[in-house]
Each structure stands twice: as C-alpha cells, then as structure tokens.
Image (cartoon, rainbow, N blue to C red):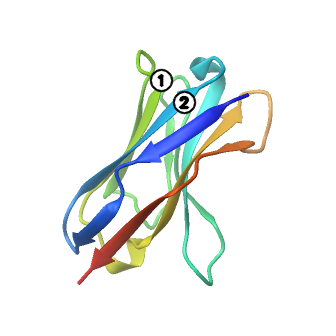
C-alpha cells in the first residue's frame, strides 16, 4: 500500500514563492508517476503537474513557466516549486501516485492548503 504525505502549504502574498513536498512510502518509488493536483471549491480537480520516474514532466498551461515539479529518488520525495503565485492558485493541493502499469492515480495524500492573498 502506498502512502503519501504532503507538507509546505501556507498563506502567502501574490508574487511570492512556495515549495510543496510529498513523501512517498510503502512501495517502490521508481515504479510510480507522481502528480500534483489542486482542488478549489466550485471547480473540478485539476492536474497541475506530473513527473515520470525518468524525469519527464507535464505542466498545466495555467502554471507553465511558474511551477516546476521534481523528484528525488534517494529520498522518495516529490516537490512542487511554485513561483510568482497568483490569487487563482489558491487551492488545496494533493500529491498523488499512479503506477506505471495503470492509467489512474490510485493513491492520494491528505492535501495541503495554499492561500494566496493580493
């Protein structure tokens, strides 16, 4: 069973930076694609960024050039570096894991709140 735990959320001002961290344990980290999702009340959950075990990344257009996902295989960690934060980035951010052999994210963290004030 995979377990995930996020940290690093908080209250920041527009234009600030924040780094979210997620620790992965329970299975072989290198067998999983890792993603960061966010949820805002009244909106559907959206995939913000994802990274394969080999380091290939995906960034949603809304965060392209501002957010960066990375992973550390030695520490079983995945990070989301968020720069030039905007009010519309306010959301609960979730770390998620998808096994390479599947097409769905089956494992989720508890979420961490990011609030951006103007």
Q: Is residue 1 left or right of residue 17?
A: right
Residue at 19% over, 70% down: 15
Is residue 21 depicted above or below 60 in this figure?
above
Q: Quadrant of residue 53?
A: top right
Coordinates of residue 47 in the picture (x, y in percent):
58, 57
* Residue that mark 2 sits on: 24
Q: Quadrant of residue 37?
A: bottom right
Residue at 32% over, 63% down: 10
- Secondary structure at numbered mark 2: strand
Residue at 47% over, 63% down: 61
- Secondary structure at numbered mark 1: loop
Q: Is residue 61 left or right of residue 17?
A: right
Residue at 40% over, 62% down: 63
Please, which residue is most extreme toward the right here?
102
**Callout 1: few (<14), some (14-19), or many (20+) C-alpha neighbours within 10 Å?**
some
Coordinates of residue 66 in the picture (x, y in percent):
31, 58
Coordinates of residue 105 in the picture (x, y in percent):
72, 44
> In this orientation, which residue lies closer to the viewer: 36 or 8?
8
> In this orientation, which residue lies closer to the viewer: 34 or 9?
9
Coordinates of residue 103 in the picture (x, y in percent):
78, 41
Q: Quadrant of residue 46?
A: bottom right
């Amino acid at each position: 069973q995979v377990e995930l735990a996020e940290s690093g959320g908080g209250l920041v001002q527009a234009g600030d930076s924040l780094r979210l961290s997620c620790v992965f344990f329970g299975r072989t980290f290198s067998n999983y694609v890792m993603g960061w999702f966010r949820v805002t009340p009244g909106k559907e959950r959206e995939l913000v960024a994802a990274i394969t075990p080999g380091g290939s990344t995906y960034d949603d257009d809304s965060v392209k050039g501002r957010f960066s996902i990375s992973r550390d295989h030695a520490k079983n960690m995945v990070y989301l570096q968020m720069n030039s934060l905007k009010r519309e980035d306010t959301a609960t951010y979730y770390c998620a894991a998808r096994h390479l052999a599947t097409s769905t994210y089956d494992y989720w963290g508890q979420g961490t709140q990011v609030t951006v004030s103007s």
